[in-house]
Image: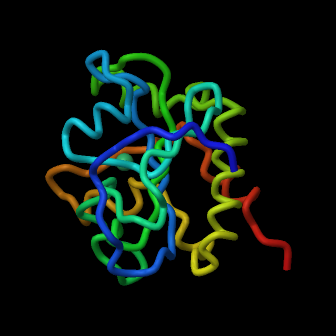
Amino acid sequence: MEFTELHNPNFEDRSRPVNGIIIHSMSEYINGMFANDFLADIGLSAHFLVGVDGAMYKCVDPDKKAYHAGLSEWGGQKYLNSSYVGIEILVEGDNDWSDFKKKIEDPATFKAEQYSSCIKLITWLKTEFPEITNENIVRHSEVSGPAVRPNDPKPDPGVGFNMIRVREAIKTPT
Ligand SMILES: [Zn+2]
């Protein structure tokens, strides 16, 4: 896979093998900072970013633990950063939180090039890490929602992101 490599210092060794993927979305720019720079600045990170034009950025090696989903729970596991890969789908522009939340409810926000890159990336990750199951390819809102984070539920990637399209594309023929 071809990635533009970016630097993010926020990672550590994994304590569990990779067995899942969390799909996020975030603003392409926040306060004038590109998404990776913003995350790095506040002590967070994602392994991969998918740009508005579908460009793929690698910020943290997926062998390492990145900080994209602290309080989270899925399939009997908690604190999924230990074993999950984080992918951020970028939302065009420099959006404040209220604009961002509106945009991620609109299907037009997410571009065909972004779906295509996201699907390619997941397919590649599944070959790199065979313990990743389709059941463990989830949205951030599914694993860090109101039941898990009552005071700060995560809305991303948003109802505008067509997860069914992704799930259909990554199904392994049986
Ligand atoms: Zn998220």
* Residue at 63% in and 47% down: 118
Give the residue at the far left of this rendering: 151
On screen, residue 107 above or below 168: above
Closer to the camera in the image, 129 or 171: 129
The percent position of residue 136, horizontal first and vertical second, equals: 52, 71
Residue 69 sits in quarter: bottom left
Total number of numbered labels? 0
The percent position of residue 13, horizontal first and vertical second, equals: 33, 70
The percent position of residue 145, horizontal first and vertical second, equals: 31, 57
Closer to the camera in the image, 50 or 169: 50
On screen, residue 167 above or below 108: below
* Residue at 46% in and 33% down: 104
Q: Quadrant of the C terminus?
A: bottom right
Closer to the camera in the image, 173 or 59: 59
* Residue at 29% in and 64% down: 12
Left or right, 22 with respect to 146, comes to right
The percent position of residue 112, horizontal first and vertical second, equals: 71, 33
* Residue at 24% in and 65% down: 148
Left or right, 28 with respect to 145, comes to right
Left or right, 99 with respect to 51, comes to left
Closer to the camera in the image, 105 or 71: 71
On screen, residue 58 above or below 171: above
